[in-house]
């Protein structure tokens, strides 16, 4: 039998500033924006419209956030919202910019939100809401 070491009884969890769920995949909005920026190189006109909106959103978030957790990609303490909420924001901006259905499908495929989505995001990410008229 192995000797059991004492471990802290309480593990610190950070919660998303938008949905209040635990941030289980702490990928910061800055790193996600970099990924979106790389994807938008295929759509430069869309990038010219979307990227300034994302950068403004990041500035606004930075000004009102109290607590962050460490990003698993860049290791900076700048993760304050979950990737689902941030990606949902990007999806909303794409809708506002009237992106076409091919772009929506590609966005969802590249950013891997076609599979199982944890609550409370399941309603936001229902397949019915993906369609674009």
Image (tube, rainbow, N blue to C red):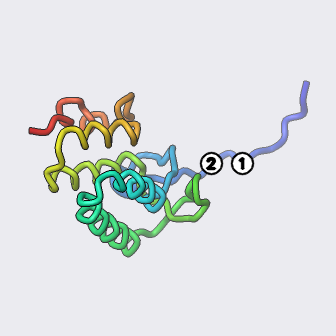
Residue denoted by label 2: 11
Rounded to the nearest angstrom, the CA distance separating label 1 from label 2 is 7 Å
Looking at the image, residue 31 lies above or below residue 113: below
Which SS class for mark 2? Answer: loop
Which SS class for mark 1? Answer: loop
Image quadrant holding the N terminus, namely top right
Determine whether, in the image, residue 117 is placed left or right of residue 123. right
Determine whether, in the image, residue 80 is placed left or right of residue 129. right
Q: Position of residue 74 (x, y in %)?
A: 58, 59
**Residue in view at x 25 percent, y 43 percent:** 103
Q: Quadrant of residue 97?
A: bottom left
Q: Residue furthest top?
A: 1
Q: Position of residue 26 (x, y in %)?
A: 52, 51
**Residue in view at x 25 percent, y 35 percent:** 123
Residue denoted by label 1: 8
Q: Which mark is residue 33?
A: none
Within-10-Å neighbours for mark 2: few <14, some 14–19, many 20+ = few
Q: Nearer the viewer, residue 124 or 67?
A: 124
């Amino acid at each position: 039998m192995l000797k059991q070491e004492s471990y802290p009884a309480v593990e610190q969890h950070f919660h998303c500033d938008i949905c209040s769920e635990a941030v289980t995949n702490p990928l910061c909005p800055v790193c996600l924006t970099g990924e979106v920026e790389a994807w938008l190189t295929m759509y430069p006109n869309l990038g010219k419209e979307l990227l300034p909106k994302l950068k403004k959103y990041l500035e606004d978030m930075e000004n009102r956030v109290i607590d962050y957790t460490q990003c698993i990609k860049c290791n900076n303490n700048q993760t304050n919202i979950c990737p689902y909420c941030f990606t949902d924001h990007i999806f909303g901006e794409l809708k506002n910019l009237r992106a076409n259905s091919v772009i929506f499908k590609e966005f969802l495929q590249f950013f891997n939100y076609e599979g199982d989505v944890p609550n409370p995001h399941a309603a936001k990410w229902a397949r019915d809401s993906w369609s674009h008229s």
